[in-house]
Amino acid sequence: MAFNVSKEGDSMEQTMNELKSFIAENVLSGNVEFDNDTVLKELGVDSFSIVEIILFIERKYNKLIPDHKLIPETFSTLRNLATVIQEIEE
Amino acid sequence: MSCLSEIPSKNYDVIVVGGGTAGVMSAIAAAKENKQVLLIEKANVLGGLATLAEVGTICGLYRNSSSEEFEFNIGRSARRFVEQLQSRCESTPQKDPTGLKYLPYQPVVLNELCIDLLNEHSIDFVLNAEITGVEENESAILSVNLLFEGKQASVKAHAYVDASGISCLSTYLNQDLIDTDFTQAASQVFSLSNVEFSSETQLSLILRIALGRGISSKVLENHQDRVYLVPGSLKNNSVSLKVTVPLPVDQTNSEQLRQSAEGMIHSILDYLKSSAKGFESVELQSIADSVGIRVVQRARGEYVLNGQDVLNCQKPENGIAYGNWPIEIWSQAQRVELRHLKENDYYSIPVASLISQNIRNLFFAGRNISADDEAMASARVIGTCLQTGIAAGMLAAAQMVETSSIEEIVDRIRTSEFN
């Protein structure tokens, strides 16, 4: 197995893991399987939960998600969320 | 003109207390049986909370299914009312992300429709009239006293329908009330203009995020994020929102609830204008005349409909109204709690829930039917209130026909409304 992931990739991976555990513990009930590309809406993540996730991100990373990123596409998957977080961090 | 300026000295066949959607339908149903009807309303408009609290959506009309179809599953007369309202409002039914189906309407139009229908059926009605007492003898109501135009009056009928929403007649008669396990939170509707959103989903999202941020940063108090969009209300840059009032509800504190709501609306609005994109230039257009009190007390009837009847979709043989709405509980929690009926199924409300336990000429309609808190959390919606209104009106109209039994009346209701 080749371990040549860049540092950026690591932190992206870490962000997705953090989001994943928040969602698993606080949003979904029971053991729901999902990965970084699962469409969250299909897991039953509703608009209230989306808001919880956004507020969690803003607290945890101490950053506001810019207005133009507050669109459905941003919240569709863990990967999209993490990408937006990375962009603010830069 | 059937809107009266004084109380006539004549005796009526049926008196309906409360001019909400249930009361209006009761009056019409009794008038269609060729009865002389008087409807007594305490506000200056008809439609009750549907008008005064600007509820904004008619719920409980459509079959509970995941399909995209909007299939009416209510009695025939209720459906006719809704179709007239829909055509006057030029509105289309909506389905929310959780699959609930409802019809948006304009409160002003609903009031006008109620007035037109009462006039069409030559039904006498009084507005701004308050019930001040009830005379009873041998387990029957003899007359009701009311204050109207500054004068006390007394008026008689053979039968009475309590559609007051607060079980006004039963309370005056010291009837047994149903124990309450919880109260539904009250909410206040208000509307904003200059709203720069084209999608309700996006508006709702930005609103919730802004309020959440306000609480995280302690600019808003903890309960101030209980603000919800009235679905279907965004048009021409204006929108209606409702806020949950953070106070316990009883039927005596509506003024206090409203004051608390007004204060909250102003602070929330100041915050939104300064902090939420799309809300910068919004203006407070209006605050609904009444705070929406979802449920208050009910008297015990011959049967108390319960939450299990609703969730198990019971359909008793003497059912006279169909319920399609989930048990919907608004507490002080941020999220409304929904307990769904079975897919594609509904429940039917037994006639016994509309009949007073002790008073033989008193019938219940709307939010006064005999149901426990859980059942009422479903049956309180307008779609169900219309139908219990019709059934109570037909029961009251049949009251003086001594030859007909309850079974025969139920049969007539079921035949004319559901077959």
Image (cartoon, coloured by chain):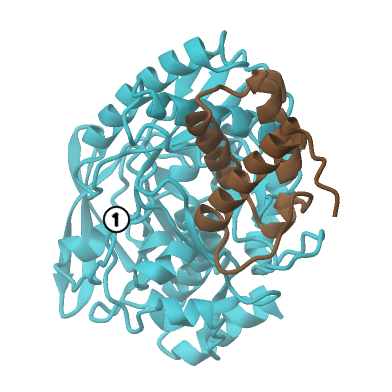
Q: Is residue B301 above or below residue B44?
A: below
Q: Position of residue B148 (x, y in %)?
A: 25, 38
Q: Is residue B406 visible?
A: yes
Relative to the observer, which residue lies in front, A68 or B274? A68
Q: Is residue B317 above or below residue B390?
A: below
- Please state if A27 lies on the left or on the right of B92 as rendered: left
Q: Position of residue B274 (x, y in %)?
A: 48, 10
User: Element under label 1?
Assistant: loop
Characterize the local packing of mark 1: few (<14), some (14-19) or many (20 or more) Cα atoms within 10 angstroms: many
Q: Position of residue B40 (x, y in %)?
A: 36, 49
Judging from the image, what is the letter of the chain drawn in cyan?
A: B
Judging from the image, what is the letter of the chain drawn in brown?
A: A
Q: Which chain is home to disc 1?
A: B
Q: Is residue B15 visible?
A: no
Q: Which residue is mark 1?
A: B166
Residue ranking furthest to the right = A2
Q: Position of residue B246 (x, y in %)?
A: 29, 40
In this figure, what is the number of numbered marks?
1
Relative to the observer, which residue lies in front, A2 or B294? A2
Q: Residue at x 50, y 14 (%)?
A: B275
Q: Residue at x 34, y 36 (%)?
A: B223
Q: Amino acid at mark 1?
A: Ile
Q: Residue at x 30, y 44 (%)?
A: B7
- Please state if B294 lies on the left or on the right of A13 as rendered: left
* Quarter of the image where one finds residue B5: top left
Relative to the observer, which residue lies in front, B40 or B164? B164
Relative to the observer, which residue lies in front, A15 or B246? A15
> Quadrant of the image for the C terminus of chain B?
bottom right
